[in-house]
Amino acid sequence: MIKEFIETPRLEKWVGRTFSFLSPNTWTTVSLVIAVLAFALVISGRIFVGVSLFIFSTLCDLIDGKVARFSNRSSTLGAFWDGTVDRFVDSLLIACFFFLPLERDPMLIGLLLFLLLFTTLLPPFIVAYANHRGAVPDPTEKVIWRIAYRVEYLVPYIAAISVYPINPAFSYYLLWFNLIMMGTTVLQSIYMVFIKAKNYS
C-alpha cells in the first residue's frame, strides 16, 4: 500500500535518470551484496551500522526498477533477478534475530522466526505461482492486491533491529506485529487468487 504513495511519475523519472550510470541488474546485485554485509555487521554487534546498510540495500532495490523503466531496459530476467534478491534480503533480515537474544523461550523464538520467514516469503510466491499456472495472469503483481507488499514489512523488521539495543521487548513485539500482518496477507493473497481466478476460467 505504501508503495503506491511513493511512486510518482516525476520522482520515478528523476531517480531513473540520476542512477542510470549502472544497469538495473547491477543495482539489484549491489542491493544483495550490501544486505550480506549488513547482516554480517548486525550479528557481529555493529547493529546501527548494519541497519544503515540494510536501509541502503532497500534504496538500491527501489532504484533498479526505476532505472529499468527510464532506460527501457526492463526484462523478464531482470524481474526474476529482482524478485529473487528481494527474497534473499528478506531472509537475511529475519536471520538477524537468530543472533539477537530476545530473552524469551528459545523454542518460542525459533517458532516465531520460522513463521515470520514462511509468511514473509509466501505472498510473492502465491502471486507468482498463480501467474505461472495461469490461474490469475498477473505479471505486474497488480491484480492480486495485498495488505503488505515489501515496504510494509521491511519497516517493522528494520525498526525491530534498530531498537533492539535500547528495548529488546519492543523489538520482540514488533516481530509479533509483523507476523500478524504477514499471516493476514498470506490468507488474503490466497483468497484473492480464488476470487480473481473466476475471471480467467
Image (cartoon, grey):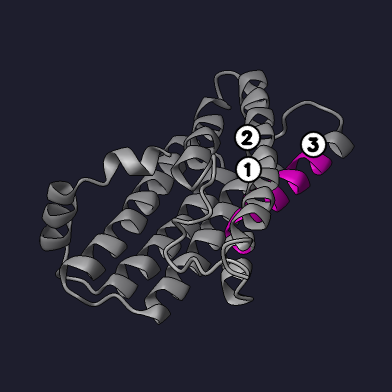
Please report the residue visible at 87 percent of the width from the left and 30 percent of the height from the top.
105
Q: Quadrant of the C terminus?
A: bottom right
Task: Indicate the amino acid at tag 3.
Answer: Ile
Inspect the image, locate mark 2, and give the three-letter code of the amino acid beneath it.
Met
Residue beneath disc 1: 185
Above or below, 136 relative to 91: below
Question: Relative to residue 179, is residue 89 depicted above or below?
Answer: below
Q: Are marks 3 and 2 in contact (CB under 8 Å)?
A: no
Looking at the picture, how far across and down is residue 80, in whole percent? 47, 74
Pointer 2 residue = 181
Q: Are marks 1 and 2 in contact (CB under 8 Å)?
A: yes
Residue 181, located in which quarter of the rendered image? top right
Marker disc for residue 169: none
Q: In the rendered structure, does residue 200 fall within the stretch colored magenta?
A: no
Question: Crowding near pointer 2: few (<14 within 10 Å), some, many (20+)?
Answer: some
At mark 2, the secondary structure is helix
**Residue 99 visible in the current orientation:** no
Separation (CA) of disc 3 from disc 1: 21 Å
Residues tagged 3 and 1 counted as in contact (Cβ below 8 A): no
Q: Nearer the viewer, residue 199 or 40?
A: 199
Q: Which mark is residue 109?
A: 3
Viewer-side residue, 15 vs 44: 15
* Residue range of the region highlighted in magenta in the rendering: 109-125
Residue at horizontal 63 percent and vertical 43 percent from the top: 185
Q: Where is residue 135? Give x, y as percent.
A: 63, 69
Residue type pointed to by label 1? Thr
Is 122 in the magenta?
Answer: yes
Q: Earlier in the sequence, mark 3 or mark 1?
A: 3
Identify the residue at image location x=56%, y=53%: 90
